[in-house]
Amino acid sequence: MANASQFDPELAISHKFPDTTYSYTERDAALYALGVGVCLSDAVDADELKYVYHENGQEFIKVLPTFATLLIGNSGASSFNLPGLEYDPQLLLHGQQYIELYKPFPASSQIHNKISLAGLHDKGKAAILEIETKSFEKDSGDLLCMNRTTVFLRGAGGFSKSSKPFSYTNYPSNQTSAVKIPESKPFSVFEDRTQPSQALLYRLSGDYNPLHSDPIFAKVAGFSQPILHGLCSLGFAVRAIIKCICRGDQDLIKSISGRFLLHVYPGETLVTEMWLEGLRVIYRTKVKERTRTVLSGFVDLRGLTSSL
């Protein structure tokens, strides 16, 4: 439990996080694309080759919208440290991710990140921490995207100063990832099998947590083998939406929301079900082999293709 005498949630709200920077090249964007399954089943996929190759003479490769999660770099982990808030990093769970996209990503860029506290909640035995990161292109100053990362810090709750549990949020409620899955037949369904080495490939994009690569570490954490990164699963799901709903046009994606519900083992098959409600796609991703839901959320679109 957090030490109430050391942690003042009201002071945490006014905490100023240092700005951070992140640089990436076209190679980083292509490596990320391969890590989330681009061209996995078809090396010359007509919708996806553009993410890894200068197709048809294009000057630069295109960048997937979920690449946004990489722009926060190492600032994500460091920003979970609020003055006086004590927690065991091994008990941290990544619960949700929300992304807003303002401009297509350049194939390479230098990024300037501004970080703030978006939410803090006392759940008794745990704390929920929400960190917002706005990523700007350093040269132009243009705002490219915003990430809101939600983590559960088990053992870090109990810091409320009154009988009412402390809860702070500074964003609209319609941006949360809790969605009701329709009972109707999905508009579209896409199946994609991950590879046994998927987590080893994805980790090269910067997340070197041994939970995704070390079999001994994974077993200590309660898994039979290393698991796939949650953000990798999110990348697979959004790729399915781009292919099935956006007809390959990644720039139609306006915002992304995902809630991580269960682990995925590399080599398992991901089945993403999609329901189209206006300009919102509600989705649910299941592991075919275990018939378990691992991810759900919504994606908002800027428009629909005429072929729909």
Image (cartoon, rainbow, N blue to C red):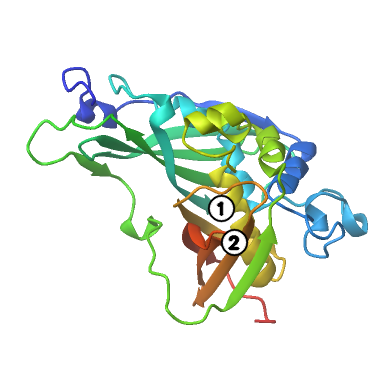
Q: Quadrant of the N terminus?
A: top left
Q: Residue at x 46, y 60 (%)?
A: 297
Is 228 placed left or right of 172 in the picture? right
Is 190 placed left or right of 75 in the picture? right
Whether 85 is drawn above or below 26: the answer is: above
Q: Position of residue 277 (x, y in %)?
A: 48, 76
Q: Amino acid at mark 2?
A: Ile
Does dot 1 land on a helix, a strand or a loop?
A: strand
The residue to which callout 2 is attached is 253
Between discs 1 and 2, the one toward the N terminus? 1
Q: Residues within 10 Å of mark 2 (few under 14, many from 20)?
A: many
Whether 154 is drawn above or below 148: the answer is: above
Is 227 placed left or right of 248 in the picture? left
Q: Which mark is residue 290?
A: none
In contact (CB < 8 Å): disc 1 and disc 2: yes
Does dot 2 land on a helix, a strand or a loop?
A: strand
The residue to which callout 1 is attached is 101
Q: Amino acid at mark 1?
A: Leu
Front position in the image: 143 or 225: 225
Q: Residue at x 28, y 19 (%)?
A: 84
Q: CA distance from mark 1 to mark 2?
A: 7 Å
